[in-house]
Amino acid sequence: LAFEDATNAKAVLISMADQADDAGYCWPSIQTLSDRTCISKRAVIDAIKWLERSAALLADRTNGRHTKYQLTPAAFTAAQRVPFVQKREQPVQM
């Protein structure tokens, strides 16, 4: 996990925790998370994917319009850490 990626994931998780109810549920938009954390929407999406793979949160997308997140910090352990793999486009060579 690169330093910047870890920082982004941590910022997104903290922002979600700040907005979560007592049961750990929140439903912020990607734009709201981007505004609150001062990182790009793409970086927010990547952070959420990593947090899901790491079991730090669950995402319920069954609504079709709004995603509801449940923070699950007890499920996140060092043994379950997942490498942050980001697909980057290769520059076009001319």
Image: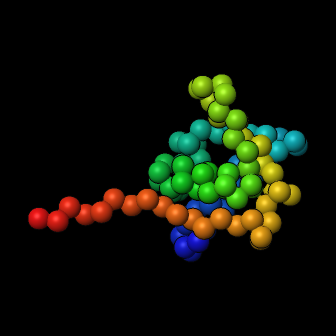
Tell me residue 50's x, y (percent).
62, 57
Structure colour scheme: rainbow
> In the figure, is residue 40 to the left or right of 72?
left
Up-down: is 11 above or below 30? below
Residue drawn at x 70%, y 35% as measured from the top left: 60
Q: Quadrant of the C terminus?
A: bottom left
Front residue of 26/65: it is 65
Up-down: is 7 above or below 49? below
Tell me residue 86's x, y (percent).
48, 61
Tell me residue 91's x, y (percent).
25, 63
> In the figure, is residue 69 to the left or right of 85?
right
Q: Quadrant of residue 70?
A: top right
Residue drawn at x 49%, y 48% as measured from the top left: 41
Q: Quadrant of residue 54?
A: bottom right
Q: Quadrant of the N terminus?
A: bottom right
Residue drawn at x 74%, y 55% as measured from the top left: 56
Q: Taking the image as drawn, is residue 19 in sight? A: no
Up-down: is 32 above or below 37? above
> In the figure, is residue 35 to the left or right of 21?
left
Residue drawn at x 67%, y 51% as measured from the top left: 52
Q: Taking the image as drawn, is residue 78 in sight? A: yes
Furthest toward the bottom, the residue is 3
Tell me residue 10's x, y (percent).
66, 62
For the image, the number of numbered tags is 0
